[in-house]
Image (cartoon, rainbow, N blue to C red):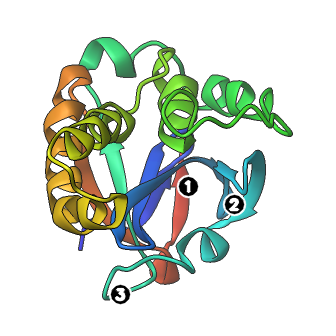
């Protein structure tokens, strides 16, 4: 386990499961154990406990903190990222492939909307139709593959896991 602090403005994620597919749910950490994320088709503020409640991690209180290529991380300071995230509160323009939680969190942090998962899954769905797989078969066959490909696609912006933090032992916030 890494240091027990979170930097305000960090992009964080936890693995979730929907039907038969595992995916990552993303948010922006805004300090004081609060996050902003796209949830139930709306951008809203929640606490870290709420954010991790559906996690499929063995230790539910663990979150992954993401990092990006330097050209993306030097654009905004902590409070600017929080201001950007807060400016979208209440937005209901959710589209799974074009405007999801990952698009939102990366936009707030880096200035560009990007989703490694959406890029993968839209192409995967088309492939399932070509090979005659039902959506359920496609979901089941690709669950781990989607997570693996999202990590590969994330490399386009240098996205990778910086550290894992246990929110139950979180000690303090840090600003950049």
Q: Residue at x 46, y 43 (%)?
A: 11
**Where is residue 79 drawn, in percent x and y?**
66, 30
Q: What's the residue at 65%, 23% (across, down)?
A: 80
Image location (x, y in percent) of residue 1: 23, 74
Q: Residue at x 30, y 11 (%)?
A: 71
Q: Earlier in the sequence, mark 3 or mark 2?
A: 2
Which quarter of the picture shows residue 164? bottom left
- Above or below, 47 relative to 110: below
According to the picture, the residue beneath numbered tag 3 turns out to be 59
Q: Which residue is mark 2?
A: 32
Structural distance between the alpha carbons of marks 3 and 2: 21 Å
Q: Are marks 3 and 1 in contact (CB under 8 Å)?
A: no
Note whether residue 60 is visible: yes
Element at label 1: strand
Q: CA distance from mark 3 to mark 1?
A: 21 Å
> For the residue carrying disc 1, how many other residues have a C-alpha within 10 Å: few (<14), some (14-19), or many (20+)?
some
Q: Secondary structure at mark 3?
A: loop
Tag 2 near tag 1, CB within 8 Å: yes
- Is residue 3 something one can see in this rendering? no
In the rendered image, the vertical position of residue 40 relative to residue 89, given as above or below: below
Residue at the extreme right of the image, as rendered = 90
Q: Does the CB distance between marks 3 and 2 fall below 8 Å? A: no
The single residue placed furthest to the bottom in the displayed view is 58
| Viewer-side residue, 78 vs 132 | 132
Mark 2 lies on a secondary structure that is: loop
Mark 3 or mark 1: which comes first in sequence?
3
Query: Which residue in the protein does label 1 denote?
Result: 173
What is the x, y in percent for residue 35?
A: 65, 54
Q: Position of residue 129 (x, y in %)?
A: 26, 42
Q: CA distance from mark 2 to mark 1?
A: 7 Å
Residue at image point 53% right, 36% down: 105
| Mark 3 or 1: the one toward you | 3
């Amino acid at each position: 386990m890494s240091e027990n602090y979170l930097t305000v403005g960090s992009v964080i994620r936890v693995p979730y499961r929907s039907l038969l597919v595992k995916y990552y749910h993303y948010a922006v950490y805004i300090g004081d154990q609060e996050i902003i994320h796209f949830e139930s088709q709306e951008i809203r503020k929640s606490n870290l406990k709420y954010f991790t409640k559906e996690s499929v991690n063995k230790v539910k209180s663990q979150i992954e903190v993401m990092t990006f290529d330097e050209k993306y991380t030097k654009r905004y300071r902590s409070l600017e990222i929080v201001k950007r995230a807060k400016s979208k509160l209440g937005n209901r323009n959710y589209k799974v492939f074009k405007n999801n939680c990952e698009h939102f969190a990366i936009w707030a942090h880096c200035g560009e909307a990007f989703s490694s998962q959406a890029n993968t899954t839209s192409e995967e769905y088309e492939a399932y139709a070509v090979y005659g797989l039902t959506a359920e078969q496609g979901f089941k066959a690709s669950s781990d593959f989607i997570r693996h490909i999202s990590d590969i696609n994330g490399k386009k912006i240098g996205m990778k896991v910086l550290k894992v933090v246990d929110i139950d032992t979180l000690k303090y916030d840090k600003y950049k």
